[in-house]
Structures are given as structure tokens and as C-alpha cells.
Amino acid sequence: MAAIAPWIEPREALQMQVGPMLERYCVSAFFARLEVGERFARSDWPAHVTLASNFVVSEPVEQIVSAIRDATVVDRALRFQFTGLAFFGPRRDVPVRLVECPDIEDVHRDLADHLGHLGGFKPDEPAHWRDGYRPHLTLRPAVDVRDGASCIASHIAIARLTGEAAEVVACFALDRSPVPKVRAVGFDLDGTLFDHHGSAADAVRNFMTELEREPTIERVTAWFELEAQHFESWRAGDLTFAEQRRLRLRDFLEFLSVVVPARDDVLDELFEKYLVDYRRAWRAFPGTEAVLENLRGRGIRIGVLTNGNHAQQIDKLNVTGLTHLIDVVCTSEDIGFAKPDPRAFEILAARLECSTSEMVFIGDNSEMDVAGARAAGIAAACVRHDDDSDAALEAALDSASL
């Protein structure tokens, strides 16, 4: 596995994708590396601060990159301090957090000067350039920062804008010194370290067999859909943990055309039969223990941040034999905040005794885990357990540590 620190690529490692001429672009600073070819809705960008808003040029992407490299922005650190709340947009209905950064206006002007020399250059809204430039972070549910928080932008990306979509056509690291040393790694639990889906699938198949129902793929899928629906209601505070279990079981029994017990205590006893099989099937993903041991051997602290029930999540770590490899466990019940709230990640970093810039986070959900961590200024990546390979966690760590 590649070393986690430093976790920015050298300038020579520029990724580039050549696009056709007469395209519309923008240039933004991001808090984590983006992949060339990555696409997202223009209304749903990852956390970023725009450095040069929408413009058109009659030049290929290489020339835009060259202009940016000639600007001084790539030779200095960009530490953003987030300040007051404001509302932008034609109807003043887009919430943003204003940004302060030493010399940020000079950085923007430098970019504007260099981009302005490109053939066919024309900004969409000249009023938002130069004297009209107001650096800001657009807020949305997965991107939220508190007044006074600060983050260092690690990458510049050029995005090509087409209709309502944006596509990353070039991304490279900002030069900064010193490079923060990664002191801690945070992990999600279910779907990242712990094979919840595999364990639950085994258990619900046994459960259906005991109910004299064939454990078809359709029925297993229905179980997980109901689990997601009612678990989210518990996470939102609409149900107790026991209530979401009962509702899930009621709906599932109806789906199976099984008579639903009227009394809660009978439902609880029936759910307990599922839980016995579920707990018996608990296992970590292949290679998990080796990865955690390797990190600890390098002096890196390890934390877990999970939205699951506190008692059950602790039990999972104990049963799978991972407890002795974990320094800190934060559950939403324990800390009062759930992913993707950036405050949950900030609390994890504080309990791991490091800053958010000294930490990376690995999870299996792009919004809950990755977007939430990045909004807190933490480098993050998704793990893909697509097969039985024991290299999935290593690959995710390598990606997050670039």
C-alpha cells in the first residue's frame, strides 16, 4: 500500500482530458482530489471555492491549464477562513458561506489576467470578475461549514459546463509547504470494515426459511429496502430503535404474506430470531484486520464514525475482533450528530487528537461519508467491496492519500 503522507500528487502528475473548442469552463479550488471524467450536476458540486466563474474560450484544455500554471495561484497555499452567511443568485435564495483568504482577490485577478489572454475569452458574467469577485462556498445539505472554520484547498480543477452538468477535464494539486502529515484515519463501519450486507443477507435467508418462505433474491432485496427506509426514520429521530425494527418486520411479513402479530412483544421475539442469525453471521471484510494493523504499525491512530446504534456497533467490533485495533469509536447516538453533518467528522478528529487536515476518511457512501468528510476539510474516498478481494481498503486508502 502506498504511503499515506504526503497525500497530494506532484505537479508532474497532472491529469488532463482534451475537450473540443468553444466550450464553457470554470476554475475552482477543491478540498480533495477529483478524478478526470468525474461528472456531477451543476446544482450539486462537491465543496469548492470558485476562483474563475463561467467563461468561454476558443482554446483546448491544455491552454487553459498552461494559463493557470503561469499564474501564481499554483505556488501558494490556499487556506480559507469561512465567515458570514449570505444569499446569492438572481433571487437571492442560494445560501453561501463567505470566504476570507490572504491575497485571494490578487489570486483571482492573476487568474483573470492569464485566462484573459486566451483566444475567444469571454466571461458569462463580467460583473462577477475582478472588482465584483466575492469568494464563497455554496452550501447544501452535504456541504456545510460553521462560521470561523478553516480549510486548506488541496486541488484546482477545471470543469467543462454543459447544460446542467459539469465534467472535470483537468485536476492538479496546489503546491503547499509543509505538507500536513496524516496522523489518523477514520472509517465508516457498516459496508466499510464490517460486511453488514453479507451478514444480513445470510440471516434473512435463514429467517425466511424458518417462516416457510423461499429466500428469493427479490425477497432479500425487499428486506434491505425496508431496512434503509425505517433506519433512516430512526436516524432522523422520528422513531425509536425498537420501533423501526417493528415497522420493518411488519412490512416484511406483509410482503411475505405471513400473518403479522398484533402485539409488540411478539414482534420483538420474532425479530430476535433474525438477530440471532444476523449476529452469528457477523464478519469483517477480508483484509480488514491486516490493513488496520499496518496503519497502527506506522503510528497512525484509527477511528470509527457510524450512524448505527451504539450498543450494536460496539458489539460488532467486539465479535469481529477489531476492537483492539480501534482508538476511538463515535456513534451518532453518542456524539449527537450524524453523518453527513461535518460536525460529526470534526468531533472524530478532535477525539483522535488531530486536525481535519491531518486525517483521511474511508466509507462506502459517497454522500454520507465522502461528501460529509470533505465538507469538514478531510480528504476522503469510497471503498468498493465489489468482490472478495482483500485489497479494497488498501485501494481506497491509496486514493484518499494522493
Image (cartoon, rainbow, N blue to C red):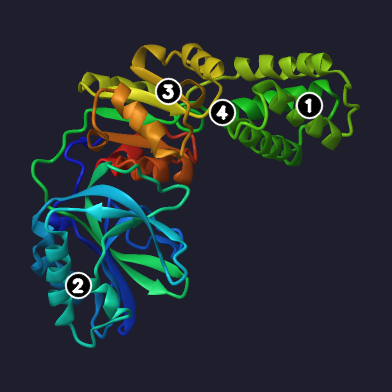
Residue identifier under label 4: 196
Residue identifier under label 3: 330
Q: How far is mark 3 from mark 1, CA to CA? A: 33 Å
The foreground one among 233 and 191 is 233
Residue 208, labelled with which disc? 1
Q: How far is mark 4 from mark 3, CA to CA? A: 18 Å
Q: Earlier in the sequence, mark 4 or mark 3?
A: 4
* Three-letter code for the amino acid on which mark 4 is drawn: His
Q: Taking the image as drawn, is residue 34 in sight?
A: no
Q: How far is mark 1 from mark 2, CA to CA? A: 67 Å
Q: Is residue 388 above or below residue 90?
A: above
The foreground one among 92 and 290 is 92
| Labels 3, 1: front one | 3
**Rendering quarter of residue 135:** bottom left
Residue identifier under label 2: 131
Q: Is residue 2 above or below residue 156?
A: above
Q: Earlier in the sequence, mark 4 or mark 1?
A: 4
Is residue 334 rendered to the left or right of residue 381? right
